[in-house]
Image (tube, rainbow, N blue to C red):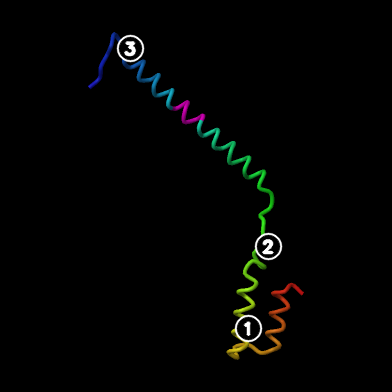
Amino acid sequence: MVIVMDGMGIGMLWMLLWGLVGLALLVLIVVAIVWLVRQLSAGPASGPPPAEAGGGQVRRELDRRLAAGEISQEEYRALRAEIDGR
């Protein structure tokens, strides 16, 4: 059902539609600017590098494998040195 008020009904509908499109575009631009500022101001990721982040867990697993006899002491020392970055 279309209501025509002397030919202005369709014009008002288009005005409303373009108003909503403009508002959506404005919101999108603001969100993009906020995201960009947060990305640029964050700098490098804080905390240890990924290899060191789970270092304790890796060392515990290495200790477990040595205790279970899955690896030799030479392998243990070599892997431990690699984990510690020596």
Furthest residue toward right: 86
Left or right? Give the position of 17 relative to 69. left
Q: Where does the image place residue 52, in percent across and percent down from the top left? A: 67, 68
> Circle 1 sits on which residue?
63
Instruction: Decide: few, some or many residues near mark 1? Use Cα within 10 Å; few <14, some 14-19, many ≥20.
Output: some
Stretch of the chain drawn in magenta: 21-26
Q: Is residue 53 above or below residue 20?
A: below
Q: Quick one: quadrant of the N terminus?
A: top left
Q: Quick one: quadrant of the C terminus?
A: bottom right
Q: Which mark is residue 85?
A: none
Q: Which mark is residue 8?
A: 3
1 and 3 marks in contact (CB < 8 Å): no
Sooner in the amino-acid sequence: mark 2 or mark 3: 3
Q: Secondary structure at mark 2?
A: loop
Q: Is residue 10 magenta?
A: no
Left or right? Give the position of 26 relative to 81. left
> Which residue is depicted at the point 68% across and 62% down?
48
> Which residue is depicted at the point 67% across and 56% down?
46
Q: Secondary structure at mark 3?
A: loop
> Circle 2 sits on which residue?
48
> Which residue is depicted at the point 43% across and 23% down?
18
Furthest residue toward top: 6
**In the foreground, 48 or 26:** 48
Q: For the residues marked 1 and 3, what is the alpha-carbon distance in whole angstroms? A: 80 Å
> Which residue is depicted at the point 66% across and 43% down?
40
Q: For the residues marked 2 and 3, what is the alpha-carbon distance in whole angstroms? A: 64 Å
Q: Is residue 13 above or below residue 25?
A: above
Q: Where does the image place residue 2, in percent across and percent down from the top left? A: 25, 19
**Badge nearest the viewer, 2 or 3:** 2
